[in-house]
Amino acid sequence: MPTQRDRGSFYENFTIRRLRNRNAVGWHWFRYIDDGPLKTKGQSSNKRVVDLKYDPYDELARSMQATNSRLYPLSDHLRGE
């Protein structure tokens, strides 16, 4: 994903798709901390929730928090309950 905002949007859309599916029982983010620097630039790989110094990717974390804080009402709404 090009930006942290894009990653946050992807997470929100993914979550909404899971909530619409009555067969989904949950989801998880596979890895929490980045797995190491990129060989060419010496930067974090930018695949996880936090970087190598355990600093969160702020825009992603805010989007995850906003989405997760409204899961149950959103689920009820999407399922028409």
Image: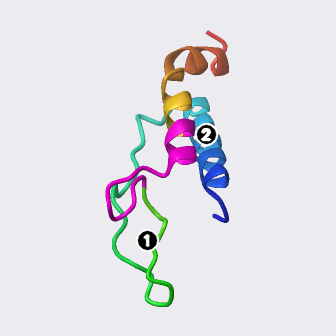
Mark positioned earlier in the residue sequence (1 or 2): 2
Camera-nearest label, 1 or 2: 1
Q: Residue drawn 56% across and 14% down?
A: 73
Magenta highlight: main SS = loop
Work out whether 66 lies above or below 57: above
Read off the magenta span: 49-63
Q: Residue drawn 46% across and 72% down?
A: 45
Q: Check disc 1 and report the residue beneath it.
A: 44
Front-most of residues 77 and 47? 47
Structural crowding at the residue carrying mark 1, measured as other residues with C-alpha within 10 Å and reported as few (<14), some (14–19) or many (≥20): some
- Quarter of the picture holding the C terminus: top right
Q: Residue furthest top?
A: 81
Which amino acid, by three-letter code, is at mark 2?
Answer: Glu
Q: Which mark is residue 12?
A: 2
Q: Is residue 22 visible?
A: no
Q: Is residue 58 visible?
A: yes
- Residue 58 placement (x, y as % from top left): 51, 46
Work out whether 15 lies above or below 56: above
Which amino acid, by three-letter code, is at mark 1?
Answer: Ser
- The answer for how far apart the CA atoms under marks 1 and 2 are is 23 Å
